[in-house]
Amino acid sequence: MVTDRNDLRRDTKGQRGPFNFRSHPNAIRALTDIGFNVFSLANNHTMDYGPAGLHETLKHVAAIPRNELYAAAGIGLNRTQAGKPHLIRIKSATVAFAALGIATNNLARHRAGKNKPGQMAYRFDDDFREVLVRLTATPADYRMLSIHYGVEGRVRADGRQIKDWRQTAAIANKVNLVVGHHAHVPRAIERAGSSIIFYGLGNFMHHGTANMTAKGICKDFGVMARVHLKRSPSGKLNPRAVEVMPVTNTHIAVVRLSGSKAASRVHVLNYLAGRLPSGGKGVEGMRFTPQSDGRGLYCFDGAARDGGKIGRLCRNWQSASSIPASIRGRIAASCAR
């Protein structure tokens, strides 16, 4: 939640030692100042300070100019607001964005109701279904769904997540990008037809929490990603390239990894992609090719001929090579669960 108040009563969420998080409004402004402009507000700490805390979050988010914060989804004063897809105009394209998270201990009081503030909760099937129906029914050139879900500390996505998210991405290819987070560690990246699934980005900035740099090669970093899109003659926006950038030091001050450290984390993502269960035709884990500046790059078929920035990016791209034997054992041991 976002607030500058210290008098709000915390919700213990039925836990003996609950974590109750809040951020000062200046923190969210710091993010928008450096370019973050689409937020999911749905997560297991959304209701840490009850309805009053949610009202505070909505108030401070609404105070940010629309040209600085394009969309903030997943919570609301009622179910209609919380499940609403937000429309973003980017040049001549329309992007629809929706979000949902998890309610701690599946507490019903944290879910948005007809006349009750809260969030849309992923582990409640009717919430998940409603968000999907509303998002896919929204006219847009590209649709993104953010889902806050996943067992903390586990790099392997669970069966429910894989099944649900693949089906989500495959709904007539109407959900183009599914972005997961919550586990605090990175997870595999997958393409399902022309859609992309990030099963978990790990941490970006999480002050005051665990120092992930001591967690081993598979868990000591987070992922920033860039998806390059190109409009087809029919008007549809199609992915043509994806870049991943491993980051570390997320508990204090985020920095990008470089050199062999970055390359080894790109290989971690490739290893995890190779451990995803088969999804049938058109579904495959994405393998990224380490670049000299620390990025990992994946290019779709024919992207080198696209011209412009995408063509330049993919001109000399080659498919990812095998994971070096010198780090494969280390990665396998760290990524065991």
Image (cartoon, grey):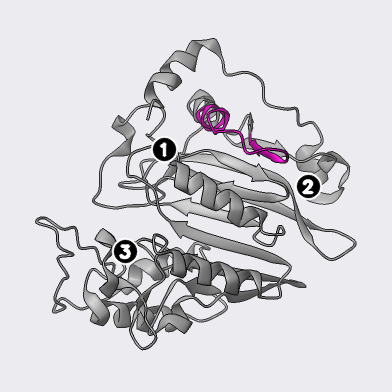
Residue identifier under label 3: 103
Mark 3 or 2, nearer chain start: 3
Query: Is residue 274 covered in magenta?
Result: yes
What type is the residue that disc 1 sits on? Phe
Alpha carbon separation for disc pair 1 and 2: 27 Å
Return the residue nearer the eye: 259 or 118: 118
Q: Which residue occupies the extreme bottom position in the image?
A: 115
The kind of secondary structure element at disc 1 is loop
Query: Is residue 267 covered in magenta?
Result: no
Residue 296 image offset from top left, x and y in percent: 61, 35
Q: Which mark is residue 221?
A: 1
Q: Which residue occupies the extreme front position in the image?
A: 125
As displayed, is residue 224 above or below residue 46? above
Q: Which mark is residue 69?
A: none
Residue identifier under label 2: 310
Label 3 crowd bin: few (<14), some (14–19), many (20+), radius 10 Å: many
Q: The magenta stretch spans which residues?
A: 268-286
Residue at figure coordinates x 47%, y 39% from the top left: 187
Return the residue nearer the eye: 39 or 309: 39
What type is the residue that disc 3 sits on? Ala
Label 2 crowd bin: few (<14), some (14–19), many (20+), radius 10 Å: some
- Where residue 156 sits, quadrant-wise, is top left
The kind of secondary structure element at disc 3 is loop
Q: Which residue occupies the extreme left position in the image?
A: 16
Q: In the drawing, does residue 309 fall left or right of residue 225?
A: right
Residue at figure coordinates x 43%, y 51% from the top left: 181
